[in-house]
Amino acid sequence: MSALYITACGDHVAGVDSDVSATELKALVTDAVGAPVRRIGRFIQLALIGAGRCAKQTPLPSTAAVYLGSGRGDLEVTIEVMQSLLRDGQAPKPLSFINTVSNAACFYVAQSLKLMGRSSFVCNRYFAFETMLQLAALDLAGGVVSTALVGTVDVVVPPLAGHRIRLGLAATTPVADASHWLCLQARPSHGALGQLLATEPFMDATALRAWLSQQVIDRNCLLATGQFMPATETVQWQRELELDIFDYRAGRAYYDSQSGAVLGEFLRSDRQGSLLHLNRDPSGRYSAMLLSK
Amino acid sequence: MGSIHLNGFGLHTTLGRGVDANVQALTSAPQPPREVSVRFAHEQRSIPYYLLAEAPLDDLEARFEHVLYGVIAEALEHAGLTTAERRAMGFFLGSSCGEMPVLEAQYRRDLQLSHEALPMVQTSSLGNLANRLRAPFGIQGPDYSYYTACTASANALLAAASMLRAGRLRHAIVVGVEMFNAVTALGFSGLQLITRDVMRPFDRRRGGLAPGEGCGAVVISTQPSRGPWTLAGGANLCDTHSISATNPDGSAIAEVIQQALRACALDATAVAALKTHGTASLLNDEGEAAGLHRVFERAPALCALKPFIGHTFGACGIVELALFCASVDRGTLPATPGICAADSDLNIVLNQERRSQPPGKFMLNYFGFGGSNTSLIVANDRAQLA
C-alpha cells in the first residue's frame, strides 16, 4: 500500500481501581469537542474524548470518515439493559436501547465534529485497532475517503470483580478505560506526525514471514508486539528479525485494544526511524503494522 | 471499479430454510407476524415477530448456532471453493443483536441460581461470534464484525468487496444474522414502532415494523463461478440529523444513493428496479421517499421485502439481497399486492404484481439507527461496469 500520513493522535487511558471512582468524563468530553454532550454513557464519552483530541490537532473536512473499533462494544449500556430487563423486570428505555447499537458512538463523534462521511463500527476480538486501521487504509488507498478518523474504545464496567471475570482476567489485574484515535490522510501533509507504511492481516506465521521478506526493514527499526502474543514468541521474532524492542505495554493496565496505544507512544517518543508492530490471536493469525517518522 | 461476483447464497427466514424455499414462498401474499410471548422478570408481553421457519424457539443457544452453521454451509456449498480457497477467505459479519439470544439465555439461567448473577460473563466480545462461526469451516482469513444497526451486513459486504478489489482477498463470505431476543423485541416495542399487521411500507395505512429473524450469507469472489450476479458497488454515509431517524427531507438518503451511482459510473436512469428499505414507519418512509424523489426523475420499479419477512435489522443487508437476487433469477420482481398501490401519500408505488424482470442493474437501499445509510448496486446482465 502507499504510505498514509498520520496528522493527529488522540489518546485517553485511565486506570479504574475502585467500583465507585471511575474518572469523571463530562469535563473531558467538553474540552475535547468544545461543547457538552448530554444523555450518553461512558463508552460514547470515551469515543468523543479520543476523537475530539485528534480533531483539535488537525482540521477535519466534513467528508472525513469515522472508523471505530472495539473488542466488546458498548459493554456498559448492554449490561445495563440486560440487568434492567432480565433481573429487574424493566423494559429497555428507548435511548438505552438505541445506544445498545454500538455505532451510536460513531453517530455522536460524527455529529459533534460535524462529519458526514462514512462511518463504521466494527468488532474484532484480538485485533480491534489493527482491524480498523486496515479498513481505513483500504478506503484511503482506494480513494473512497480522503481523511479517516480511526479509533478504538474500551470501557470498564464495575463492579471490577465482575469485569475481570468477564474479560477472563486474574482477580488482581489492573484494568483501564481507554480510547486511542488517530487521523489519517492519503495526501502528504507538512505537519504529519508520521507515516503508516503498512497494516496487514495474515492467516499464519508463514504468510507473515513471506510478507516480512518483501519489506525494507533496516536494523534501526524497532519491534513492538501486541498483548495477545506470548512473551516467548516475542523473543523469537526479536531474534529472527534482529530488532530492538519498543516496549509500550510495560505497566499498562489491561484493556482489549492496547495495540491502539503503540502509534501514539512511538510518535510522541524521541525515537526516530520506523516501528514494526506484530500481534497474533489464539488461532495463529497475525497482524502487522509498519510506521515511520 | 472491478465487479465482484456473488457466487453462492445461503438463507433462512420466516419463509423457509434455504434459498429455494424462500423464493418459492415469496410468490404467496405477505402474512402478518406471529405473536410471541416475551417473558421478563414476572411479566409477560406479547410481541409480533416473524420467527424462522423450521426452527422452534426451544433451546435458543443451540438454535442460534445450528441456524447460522446451516446458512453458512449452504452458501459455501453453492460457491464450490477448494479447501485452500476456503482457508484463505475473509469472514465478514453484520448484525444488530449479535449473540444477544445466547447472552440472554445464559443470563436467565444464571439468575435462576443467584439474583446477584452478572450478565455476559461467559462471553462478552462482539468479536467472538465471528471466531466461533469461521472455525468449523476452516476459515483462517481475517474477520470483521460490523455492528452498524440495519446497515450492518450491507456495510460488511461493501468492505469485503473493497478487500477483493484491492487484491487483499480472493474470496470472502459475508454473513448477516438477526435472531429473536427480548432486548430487541421490547426495545422496539418501547419505541412504539411495532405493528401487529403486515408491514405496509410507504402506504397511507403504514403502522410500523414487525421484527423478523433472518440469517443470510453470500460468498463473493473476484472470479465468476455460479450465477450471473455481480456487486457493482455502493456507498455508505453518516446522516447526523438524528440517531433514530433519517432526515425527513431526504437529502442524506439522496446523497448516499448518488454516491453509489457515482461509484459505479451509472446514471439514475440505469437502475432497472430498486429494493426499498421500507420500514413502514412514519418518519423513515417519509425520508426515504423524499430521497428517492430527489434522485429519480422517474422512479424505477420499486419493491419492498419486509412485508414478507419482517425487519431483520442488521441481517437485512444480506437477507434481502439474497431474496431479491433469487426472485429476479427466477424472472420476477417481488410484488406486494395491495400494499402501497396507487394512493400513497408519499407518491411512491410499489410493484403490485409478479412481472417479468429482465436482466439489468438494481439498487438495494438500507438505512439504520445511528445515521448509517447504505446503498448497494448489483447487476445480472454481465455488463462491464466502469
Image: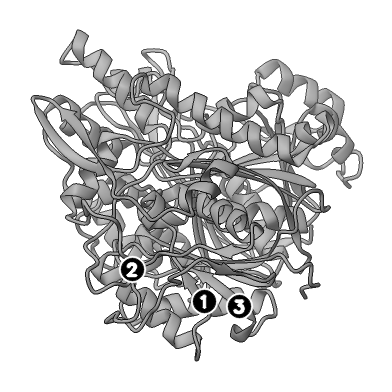
From the top left corner, tell me how far across and down residue B119 is, in percent.
29, 24
From the top left corner, tell me how far across and down residue B339 is, in percent.
33, 68
Q: Give the labeled residue for mark 2.
A: B338
Q: Horizontally, is A224 left or right of B117 in the view? A: right
Q: Give the labeled residue for mark 3.
A: B271
| SS class, disc 3 | strand
> Going from the N terminus, do you reach mark 2 or mark 1 first?
1
Q: What residue lies at 63% left-to-right and 21% top-to-bottom?
A: A282
Q: Nearer the viewer, residue B345 or A83?
A: B345
Q: Is A254 situated above or below B367?
A: above
Q: Does the residue at mark 2 contact the one at mark 3 (Cβ under 8 Å)?
A: no
Q: Horizontally, is B108 left or right of B162 in the view? A: left
**Given the image, what chain letter belongs to the residue carrying mark 2?**
B
> Going from the N terminus, do you reach mark 3 or mark 1 first?
3
**Given the image, what chain letter belongs to the residue carrying mark 3?**
B
Kind of residue sitting beneath label 2: Gly
Q: Is residue A43 visible?
A: yes
| Mark 2–mark 3 distance (CA, rounded to whole Å) | 24 Å
> Going from the N terminus, do you reach mark 2 or mark 3 first?
3
**Quarter of the image that includes the C terminus of chain B:** bottom right
Q: Horizontally, is A193 left or right of A68 in the view? A: right
Kind of residue sitting beneath label 3: Val
| Mark 3–mark 1 distance (CA, rounded to whole Å) | 9 Å
Q: Give the labeled residue for mark 1.
A: B301
In the orientation shown, which residue stands out farthest toward the top? Answer: B113
Q: What residue lies at 22% left-to-right and 57% top-to-bottom?
A: B193
Kind of residue sitting beneath label 1: Ala
Q: Horizontally, is B365 left or right of B349 in the view? A: right
From the top left corner, tell me how far across and down residue B115 is, in percent.
15, 15
